[in-house]
């Protein structure tokens, strides 16, 4: 176990963490703001990359490809939303259905190949693993930071608007929202679209970063997103009250998650066991507030009910 | 003006849990009417309010406000006309949002929600004044999360939210039932004040016969999904709890007699 090999791997972990952090911000919007667990993201996390890479391989510009990737993600969110609101299917199941169908759709986008490479020497990519240890404007850490900052700014503005407030209200109290004239179905559709659009952006960035898109690259994305949200809750829950800071916390949470993974790998864990480890960590952290609540209620007795 | 015409609603039809909740409700309210609704459990009081609010569609009948048929409108589209306060203090407000944010949501009831800022500076000043009228000190806690408030404070806030944008009809669904007696009296008094100031057409469901007599200009008693008693004006002023109890016994007793007649 050589400490320099770990240190060498850290910039890559940070870059990956930041890119997955963007996805985690998307998860935060459904899971925390809208109070929906949206499993679409496991599919969308490959769709964005597939659309972006395939468009670029057929000669389209970087920005157009990124934009269409985001729109593809939003469409996936819309489908899940329609399953849920127009067809009355529970949100979790709606996401699972879209996720499953996206597997076929992603393959179709990728010319029915399980992966498609995109070479950084031939194409202008938004981020690339190649520059992760260089001090240059092309460093993916810098680009990912800038995109994260812009995204947080945009979301902070949006959730302060009338429309954004209506979305937050829908997540906080549906009955009250309808009584105040909010069409909660529209809120959910919109929230799912925004969330999956962000996830698709993250997916496109990840495909660029690693130089290829893989049909399986989104597997377990929801768990990574939840892990980031939970790490942020545990570490910064008391500290970060402001919405923008909470989103920042989620991004930091994803970076921490990837650094921890790197350390665990460095300690010699078999790579194939990583997903098992991730799931166990998330399960434990999801249980902590529940256990805390149980402890609290036995210690303190009845709460203040004045 | 509110008209309920022959409203019918059966829950869980064709199952063992089938329950006829509304069995032909007819009711007419004039502008400015403040009607209290009493009745036993399952009489259809809250169901009537939920039918008006559009929580679910009715099986039969019509709901008209100022002659406009709203029977087919979804819940969020009717919201413009209605102010609602619920029995559970948790239902009427968003706990994880600030006091002023809750008010800003209510101020936009029935309006298209755009990408304009969710709450303006002028609004904040207005909300501060309106909150001050509640006399609960909430005007100094406008950015506090509503989840930190007590049940009474939340009901007072919900009342303010329901009337911030003057509704055509105010629906109070046992809105003091979950509060302690002192807080309940305070919220009830506040309701009366707001209703009188704004001349609001109001339906107030209550379990408390004394309150039903003391408040409003009309009293309606429901039983088994129908209106069985409707007392207004001078006659209502002379009502006592005892008289109401007698009326109630008579209403349910008649039913019993009918049943016996059927069986014999």
Image (spheres, coloured by chain):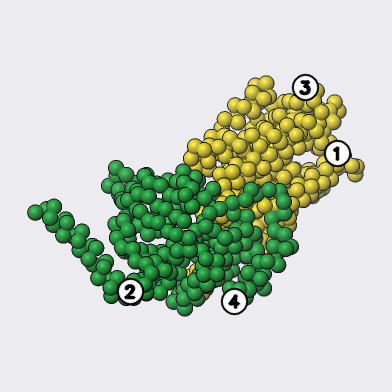
User: Which SS class for mark 2?
Assistant: loop
Instruction: Tell which chain the image draws in yellow.
Output: A
Residue drawn 60% across and 42% down? Answer: A189
User: Which mark, residue A141?
Assistant: none
The residue under label 2 is B239
Labels 1 and 2 within one chain: no
Gap between marks 1 and 3 measured at Cα: 25 Å
Q: Is residue B91 left or right of residue A203?
A: left
User: Closer to us: mark 3 or mark 2?
Assistant: 2
User: Which mark, residue A131?
Assistant: 1
Tell me: residue A6, above or below residue B134: above
- Determine the image quadrant of residue A144: top right
Labels 2 and 4 within one chain: yes
User: Closer to us: mark 1 or mark 2?
Assistant: 2
Residue drawn 72% across and 63% down? Answer: B122
Does label 2 or label 4 sit earlier along the sequence? 4
Chain letter of the residue carrying label 1: A
Labels 3 and 2 within one chain: no
Residue furthest to the left: B264
Instruction: Give the percent coordinates (x, y) of residue A101.
Output: 57, 30
Residue drawn 45% across and 50% down? Answer: B64
User: Which mark, residue B135?
Assistant: 4
Q: Evaluate whether residue B147 shows in this view.
A: no
User: Which SS class for mark 4?
Assistant: loop
Gap between marks 1 and 2 measured at Cα: 85 Å
Mark 1 and 3 residues: CB-CB less than 8 Å, in contact?
no
Chain letter of the residue carrying label 3: A
The residue under label 3 is A58
User: Closer to us: mark 2 or mark 4?
Assistant: 2
Residue furthest to the right: A136
Instruction: Tell which chain the image draws in green.
Output: B
């Amino acid at each position: 176990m050589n400490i320099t090999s770990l240190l060498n791997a850290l910039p890559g972990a940070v870059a990956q963490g930041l890119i997955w952090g963007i996805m985690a911000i998307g998860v935060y919007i459904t899971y925390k703001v809208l109070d929906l667990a949206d499993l679409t993201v496991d599919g969308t996390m490959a769709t964005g990359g597939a659309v972006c890479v395939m468009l670029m391989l057929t000669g389209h510009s970087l920005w157009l490809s990124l934009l269409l990737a985001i729109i593809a993600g939003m469409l996936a969110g819309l489908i899940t939303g329609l399953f849920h609101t127009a067809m009355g299917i529970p949100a979790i199941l709606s996401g699972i259905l879209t996720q499953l169908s996206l597997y076929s759709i992603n393959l179709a986008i990728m010319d029915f190949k399980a992966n498609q490479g995109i070479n950084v020497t031939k194409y202008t990519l938004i981020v690339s693993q190649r520059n992760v240890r260089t001090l240059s404007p092309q460093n993916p850490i810098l680009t990912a930071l800038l995109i994260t900052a812009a995204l947080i700014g945009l979301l902070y503005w949006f959730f302060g608007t009338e429309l954004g407030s209506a979305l937050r209200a829908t997540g906080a109290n549906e009955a009250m929202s309808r009584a105040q004239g909010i069409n909660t179905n529209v809120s959910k559709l919109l929230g799912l679209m925004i969330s999956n659009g962000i996830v698709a952006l993250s997916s496109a960035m990840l495909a660029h970063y690693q130089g290829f898109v893989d049909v399986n690259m989104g597997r377990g994305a929801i768990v990574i997103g939840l892990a980031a949200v939970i790490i942020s809750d545990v570490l910064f829950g008391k500290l970060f009250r402001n919405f923008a800071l909470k989103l920042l916390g989620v991004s930091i949470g994803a970076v921490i998650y990837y650094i921890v993974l790197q350390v665990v790998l460095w300690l010699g864990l078999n790579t194939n066991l990583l997903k098992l480890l991730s799931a166990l960590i998330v399960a434990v952290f999801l249980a902590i507030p529940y256990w805390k609540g149980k402890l609290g209620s036995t210690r303190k007795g009845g709460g203040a009910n004045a | 003006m509110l008209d309920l015409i022959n409203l019918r609603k059966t829950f869980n039809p064709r199952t063992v849990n089938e329950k006829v909740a509304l069995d032909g409700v007819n009711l007419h309210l004039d502008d400015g009417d403040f009607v209290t609704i009493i009745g036993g459990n399952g009489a259809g009081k809250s169901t009537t309010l939920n039918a008006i609010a559009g929580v679910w569609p009715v099986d039969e009948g019509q709901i008209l406000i100022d002659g406009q048929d709203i029977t087919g409108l979804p819940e969020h589209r009717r919201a413009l006309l209605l102010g609602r306060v619920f029995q559970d203090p948790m239902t009427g407000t968003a706990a994880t949002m600030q006091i002023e944010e809750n008010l800003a949501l209510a101020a936009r009831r029935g309006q298209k929600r755009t990408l304009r800022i969710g709450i303006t500076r002028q609004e904040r000043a207005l909300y501060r004044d309106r909150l001050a009228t509640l006399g609960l000190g909430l005007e100094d806690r406008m950015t506090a999360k509503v989840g930190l408030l007590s049940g009474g404070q939340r009901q007072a806030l919900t009342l303010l939210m329901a009337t911030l944008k003057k509704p055509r009809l105010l629906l109070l669904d046992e809105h003091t039932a979950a509060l302690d007696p002192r807080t309940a009296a305070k919220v009830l008094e506040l309701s009366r004040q707001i209703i009188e100031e704004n001349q609001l057409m109001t339906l107030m469901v209550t379990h408390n016969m004394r309150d039903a007599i003391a408040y409003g200009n009309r009293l309606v008693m429901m039983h088994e999904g129908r209106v069985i008693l409707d007392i207004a004006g001078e006659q209502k002023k002379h009502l006592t709890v005892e008289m109401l109890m007698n009326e109630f016994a008579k209403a349910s007793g008649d039913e019993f007699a009918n049943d016996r007649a059927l069986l014999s």
